[in-house]
Image: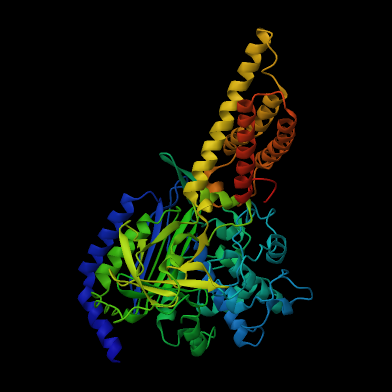
């Protein structure tokens, strides 16, 4: 009763005038950004403070966004809802969080050399250890799409680390959890979610598989290119539990109200209060001193001093955010029909500044009187680190090379006592060792943790959910970019100059320059040059948004050809090596140049192999 009275007074204080002011602020923010349409839902206690739509659901039809009828993608916000389905089945006794998922199938689904089993607990906390895979995860039409089980079996990525060791965000992990549910239940995933979750939550217009009639009210997605927006056709995300859900503003409003009730999920028949509490509590963190953690497919973070339970979603043609502020009985949902978070970030800032009280300053973690020390030097923790969320064994690994994924940062030692790392603004942050694998900043309230395996430091953890792997300096983006660019330029010059020299010598009837060394050097250089040209040509035959989603519809045929050219160059390099060995009559300087070509070719081939640009690693 006391809480209700407080919320009533807060609502009275907020008042109609303030609501109008807030609406005006959000509208002004919307007009500053490129999204054609947007939805904003704000719930506090028992009341809806805002359920507003802006702009158009479809520009070509001049169709406005309707809070009741317009359905829109929520992207990765699908994952928390998928967790409801899995945990509901756990409470029914159909599934077990800690059972090896292979035991649910007649034949093992996860087949690798790792002795560590994969469990639903691992899948629901992004800790199963799977590689990141994007190629072929979407289909342009319903006819091209395959069932969830078939997709899982065909696209099962490699496990790159034992389960439970670290957390690395995984669409595939969430999709696999949904498939285990589907297989154990006997119904398809969408039917389970419709009957067991959405209907009970009062979300009657939400689904993981909208039919053609529902799609007539779809909020069309748009992709920004140059000065304009490209309308996108609705496509089918085959790892459906990870990102295929659609909903309406009113459905999300109903859900947010229910979630803010202490026993809302229990009263709806979805989850017990105990399971709901467990779902929204930290189930995985790399270290308890680090910020953030994972519940069961829920992100637990801090924003502007406020505790947040929520999730964001992003895909071509959409962006969305669902956040709960449990300490203030407040929830916000925002969605737009472009893959751009500018509006959502700006609106989130205004909403939290307006609706939530000024947070109390968090007490600074006191530095210990004496720092931890042992025989391990601080330099053991100095290295370059790469975020683990990227494709390690597939063609799309090059996204790291171009800076699209796999953010890197460097730690350096300062004397024998401090570790230096950059802040997000680039300023140096000084950290002192306070535990064997934990450092604390002496400049701000920040912790950095590490993972050790077989006596070696292998990973750095910047948050409870973000893992970064240690790199050899030759693997770093800067070194790789410099070397690949330099060697490609070297071989391009040879490819351009040698044919001219051959032609001049032929005209002058001087054939000795066209020696076997020169011919094989050109044989090495041309395939690498053709690799560059084929990449450029391939880009002309693929839409930019397909690259953004990691070749979600598959890789164009020309890329298959481009990855074969380095193999041709490799064989020419072997032949050149043999010719060098036999070319006794050639001057030493001439042979030294040929040796340089061989060394650069083998090194470039190794780099391209490292980035999965050799052979069909699709």
Q: Residue 562 appears at what percent x and percent y?
A: 66, 39
Whether 583 is drawn above or below 568: the answer is above
Q: Residue 511 appears at what percent x and percent y?
A: 70, 14
Whether 539 is drawn above or below 43: the answer is above
Q: Quadrant of residue 189?
A: bottom right
> Of all residues shown, which one is farthest toward the bottom?
1
Q: Residue 196 appears at what percent x and percent y?
A: 59, 79
| Left-right relation of 291 to 502 | left
Q: Is residue 466 in view?
A: no
Whether 595 is drawn above or below 179: the answer is above
Image quarter where the N terminus lies is bottom left
Say which of 588 and 217 sits in front.
588
Say which of 111 and 19 sits in front.
111
Instruction: Give the residue displayed 58% in from the left and 79% down from the top.
Output: 121
Number of numbered discs on residues: 0
Q: Quadrant of residue 341?
A: bottom left
Q: Is residue 307 in view?
A: yes
Q: How is the image coloured?
A: rainbow
| Left-right relation of 522 to 255 | right
């Amino acid at each position: 009763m006391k809480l209700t009275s407080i919320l009533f007074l807060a609502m009275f204080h907020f008042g109609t005038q303030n609501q109008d002011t807030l609406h005006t602020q959000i509208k002004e923010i919307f007009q500053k950004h490129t999204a054609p349409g947007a939805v904003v839902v704000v719930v506090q206690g028992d009341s809806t403070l805002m359920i507003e739509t802006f702009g158009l659901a479809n520009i070509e039809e001049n169709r406005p966004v309707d809070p009741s009828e317009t359905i829109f993608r929520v992207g990765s916000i699908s994952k928390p809802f998928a967790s409801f389905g899995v945990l509901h089945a756990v409470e029914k006794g159909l599934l077990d969080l800690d059972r090896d998922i292979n035991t649910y199938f007649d034949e093992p689904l996860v087949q690798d050399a790792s002795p560590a089993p994969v469990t639903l607990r691992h899948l629901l906390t992004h800790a199963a250890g799977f590689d990141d895979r994007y190629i072929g995860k979407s289909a342009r039409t319903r006819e091209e799409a395959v069932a969830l089980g078939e997709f899982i079996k065909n696209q099962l990525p490699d496990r790159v680390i034992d389960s439970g060791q670290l957390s690395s965000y995984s669409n595939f992990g969430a999709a696999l959890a949904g498939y285990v549910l589907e297989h154990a239940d006997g119904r398809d995933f969408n039917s389970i979610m419709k009957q067991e979750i959405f209907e009970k939550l009062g979300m009657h217009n939400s689904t993981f598989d909208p039919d053609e009639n529902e799609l007539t009210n779809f909020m069309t997605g748009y992709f920004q290119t140059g000065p304009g927006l490209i309308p996108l056709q609705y496509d089918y995300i085959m790892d459906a539990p990870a990102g295929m859900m659609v909903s309406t503003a009113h459905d999300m409003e109903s859900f947010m109200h229910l979630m803010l009730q202490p026993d809302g999920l229990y009263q709806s028949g979805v989850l017990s209060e105990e399971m709901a509490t467990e779902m929204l509590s930290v189930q995985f963190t790399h270290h308890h001193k680090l910020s953030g953690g994972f519940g069961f497919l829920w992100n637990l973070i801090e924003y502007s001093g406020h505790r947040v339970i929520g999730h964001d979603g992003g895909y071509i043609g959409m962006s969305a955010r669902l956040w709960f502020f449990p300490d203030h009985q407040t929830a916000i949902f925002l969605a737009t029909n472009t893959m751009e978070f500018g509006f959502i970030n700006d609106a989130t800032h205004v909403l939290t500044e307006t609706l939530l009280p000024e947070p109390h300053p968090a007490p600074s973690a006191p530095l210990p009187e004496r720092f931890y020390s042992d025989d391990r030097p601080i330099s053991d923790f100095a290295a370059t680190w790469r975020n683990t969320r990227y494709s390690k064994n597939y063609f799309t690994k090059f996204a790291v090379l171009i800076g699209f994924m796999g953010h890197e940062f460097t730690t350096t030692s300062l004397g024998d006592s401090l570790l230096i790392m950059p802040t997000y603004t680039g300023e140096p942050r000084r950290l002192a060792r306070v535990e064997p694998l934990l450092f604390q900043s002496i400049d701000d309230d920040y912790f950095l943790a590490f993972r050790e395996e077989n006596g070696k430091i292998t990973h750095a953890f910047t948050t409870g959910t973000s893992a970064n792997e240690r790199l050899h300096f030759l693997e770093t983006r800067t070194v790789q970019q410099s070397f690949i660019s330099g060697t490609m330029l070297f071989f391009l010059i040879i490819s351009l100059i040698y044919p001219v020299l051959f032609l001049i010598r032929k005209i002058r009837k001087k054939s000795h320059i066209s020696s076997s060394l020169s011919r094989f050097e050109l044989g090495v250089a041309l395939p690498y040059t053709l690799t560059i040209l084929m990449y450029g040509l391939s880009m002309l035959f693929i839409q930019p948004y397909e690259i953004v989603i990691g070749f979600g519809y598959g890789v164009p045929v020309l890329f298959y050809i481009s990855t074969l050219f380095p193999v041709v160059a490799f064989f020419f390099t072997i032949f050149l090596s043999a010719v060098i060995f036999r070319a006794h009559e050639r001057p030493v300087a001439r042979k030294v140049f040929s040796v340089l070509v061989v060394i650069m070719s083998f090194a470039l081939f190794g780099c391209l192999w490292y980035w999965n640009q050799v052979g069909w690693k699709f």
